[in-house]
Every structure is written in C-alpha cells, then in structure tokens.
Image (spheres, rainbow, N blue to C red):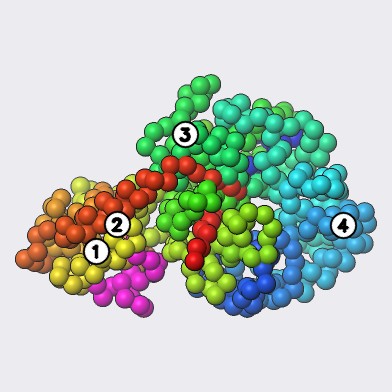
Amino acid sequence: MATRFTLIFAASLFLLLLDCCSGSFIGVCYGRSADDLPTPDKVAQLVQLHKIKYVRIYDSNIQVLKAFANTGVELMIGVPNSDLLSLSQFQSNTDRWLKNSVLPYYPATKITYITVGAEVTESPDNTSSLVVPAMTNVLTALKKLGLHKKIKVSSTHSLGVLSRSFPPSAGAFNSSHAHFLKPMLEFLAENQSPFMIDIYPYYAYRDSRNKVPLDYALFEASSEGIDPNTGLLYTNMVEAQMEYFYFALMALTSERFKGSCPLRPGLAFQRLTLRETAATPDNAQTYNTNLIRHVINNTGTPAKPGEELDVYVFSLFNENRKPGLESERNWGLFYPDQTSVYSLDFTGRGAVDMTTQANITKSNGTTWCIASTKASQIDLQNAIDWACGPGNVDCTAIQPSQPCFEPDNLASHASFAFNSYYQQNGASDVACSFGGTGVKVDKDPSYDNCIYMRAGSNKTVTSNTTAMSSSTSSSSQNANLTSSVFAILLVTCLSALMHIQRY
C-alpha cells in the first residue's frame, strides 16, 4: 500500500491517483488538430480494434461523444482554457455546460474524468486563478445529479510548475504557483480525485544534450544513474522525472491532511521524441513497448517500487495543423488513413517483456525462446519465414482468428514460432539463436488462450539443427550497427514516441 501522505501545494509530473483508487493502465490521447483525420465513428472502431480501453480528448465534442457510445471505452473529456472564465464565474454556466455537453451522452458514453483546464501555467493569459473555482463549479454540478463519485474532476499540469528537478530527490515546486496549487490539492484530496501531469522528457534532452543518451530514454540503458542524496539507481528517464515530483510532493507533506485518503503517484500523459534527424519508427516502437510493459507490470519507480501508474500515450494520430517544428505534427501512433506507424500491443500481454523479455508467469526450471526487443522488423520477418518454412514449425496458431494471432505484430508472432522450434529441437542454445534475434527466458510467455510449448510437449525433432542462416545473422548485426548511430535523444510528455515520415 502506498505511504499515506498529502500535500499543501504541488506541481506536475505524473497523475496522482488516490490510495483508494486502483490503477495501472495504458490509454491514448486523441487530439484533432488536423484536417485529414477519419471521422469519430471510424476512430472509435479503430480504438476498439486495437483494444484501447482508455481515451483522452481535450474538449467535449458532440460527435466524438456520440461515436464512443456503447463501446465500453472509458473517456476523459476536457474543459479548454478558453472556457475557464465562463465556468468559474457562474454556477449556472457550469450547470448548462454539463446539461448540454455531458448528460445527453452519459452513461452510454462512459465518461470517467473531466479535466478542467490544461497546463494553465503555460498559458500567456494567466488563467491559473480560474482553475479551482471552475473545478468546484463542475463538481457542484455533478453532485446535483449524483454523478460526483462516477466522474472525477481534475486538471493537467506541465513540468513548468517545478523550480528544481535534479537530482530527483531535490525536486521542488515553484513557489509562484502556490496560490492555485494549494487549494487545488486540497480539492483533490477532499474529493479523492487524481492529480494529473504531462511529462516532457524532450526538455530534459534539450537542456542537457550531451548528458542524456538515447538508451536511457528508451528504457534500455546499460548503466545506471545514482541520486547522490538517496543512493537510488535510475535506469530510465521516465522514472527519474516521475520522482522529481514524488520528492517534491513529499517535501510538501502536511499533517493537516492526516487521516484523509492520500494522493499518490498514479497517472501521467507522456510524449517522447527523438532529435528531428533521428526520429524513427523503430525507436518509437521500442520506447512505447517498454513504457507499456513498465506500466502494466506495476514496475513503479526506485523510491516507490510496485507503485501503480496510469498513462495516456500521446497521441492517436499525426496532426498536420499543429504549429512549430515538424515533430509537433508527428506524434501519432496511426496515420490519418488508420494504418499503424508501427505495431504496438496496448494490452501489455504479448510475449515480449520490457526487462526480462518474457511474460510474468514464473516457471520451474523450464526455459522458452522468444523474440528480442532489439531485433529489427526485417530480421523478425525473415526469422518467421524460416521457422514456419524450413524450420518445420506449425504456425497455425499465429494465423488470423487463431489463439496467438493477437497481438498482431511481428515480435509476438516471432516469439511463438521461435519457441516452437526451440522446444522441438531439444531446447538447446543453438535452437534459440535465429541470427541473434532469439533470446531464452525463464518465464512463461503464454497469455490468454495462447499457450506456448514447453519442454517435453509435442517435441518433434527436425533435421534442422541451426536456427536461421548466417545471412540473417549478418543482417541483424548490421541493424545493431545502424541503431548505435542514434546516440542522442530528444524527449517530450508521458505518451508516444513520434516518427517523422520522410519521402
């Protein structure tokens, strides 16, 4: 159980859910700053197809709310900064907004959160003083309808509310924001609502360009950073940034809230991007796959191991009308034609795990062979073709409508094929080589109805004793050399790694 504490005033990093709530899920932010996006109806179908169960939008668009009716997808809607004045001034304005924007579609559309304002400290017109009054009015309107326990009210914040963030244990909030953060935290604690933040690893890279390596941002660092004050070890950027806020919040602990349901680290919106010249689908896929595993497995952070963390990945689509650098228009997981920029399993139940490259079910001395997270898409496809052809593996289970077809990506399909060949050929080291794309694990990768073969089951020894040819191994080595070129990273907010498509 999380340590019971609350805060007097605070800042932003990861959404803080209450101890009374349970979390650890992955959602997606659905921005619409584009003129070429599919209709909301098609978007709702796409979301369901990819088993995305949590979606955030930034307003209360009627067409979007209608489209998500009866889908079971939990929707977070928003009050834009431009509407804060109206909703904060008069309760009647808020009642009218709720009546027109929420009630006609609820509960068919499963609205679970209302965010009032977004990153108001970054707003040039200084609307921060309007946030808590508007939140209070929204809550009052919900209470009148008996919905205040079903729909939670909060707001989102940028990293700009921090005044100090390194090392993590020295995290501190900017005192200039205390005038609205203190009453906001009191509101959240009293109403058991989450504290939400946007994480921007991009700025950490921009300000420390020569100190932040790419693998540290991708959850694949081979070395650890040590906080000199606590001795805690950090192996990735996300954990470090989360703990800036954890320690800042701890520093603001107040006895005043003792005994109430405490706030705890819980939900974040995240974006990560590479340098404009180094943005690739492979790096995007690596980051988001690892992020999803980190969340779904309740990995937590060094100071709060096992802590639940709910994350909304940014963003569902590339958005061609966003201003700024090219990266701002290329955060999408999907192109406007609804094709994937890269494959991603949102359930977190596929075969490849972030740290051990396996699922979480322990074995008793048995080993399995699955696809390496570092393998390129080309090498994985070649390996699948070989295993399901010359390797004599029965690959029926990874065909459409079969138990191991979902998640429909090369890493998952390759893992099933690799393991089948591995078990059929004596579970030897050489039977799991696949040109360097296979790795042995001691945790059962099986999930749902997809059961991975284990030693002694259906063992059919073939005449092929070497998994993959030398040409594939050479290809894998070349891919590794290529990936090593990306020595620097550009990061930005808890969400998706962007990919700039080049023509």
Q: CA distance from mark 4 to mark 2?
A: 52 Å
Q: CA distance from mark 3 to mark 4?
A: 42 Å
Q: Which residue is mark 3?
A: 234
Quarter of the image where one finds residue 92: bottom right
Crowd around label 4: few <14 · some 14–19 · many ≥20 (10 Å): many
Q: Are marks 1 and 2 in contact (CB under 8 Å)?
A: yes
Q: Is residue 356 left or right of residue 134?
A: left
x, y percentage for residue 466?
12, 58
Q: Which residue is mark 4?
A: 87
Mark nearest the camera among 3 and 4 is 3
Q: CA distance from mark 1 to mark 4?
A: 58 Å
Please give the name of the residue rendered at 65% of the width and 63% of the height, measured from the top-left corner: 31
Mark nearest the camera among 1 and 2 is 1
The amino acid sitting under disc 4 is Leu
Please give the name of the residue rendered at 39% of the width and 69% of the height, measured from the top-left corner: 408
Stretch of the chain drawn in magenta: 395-411
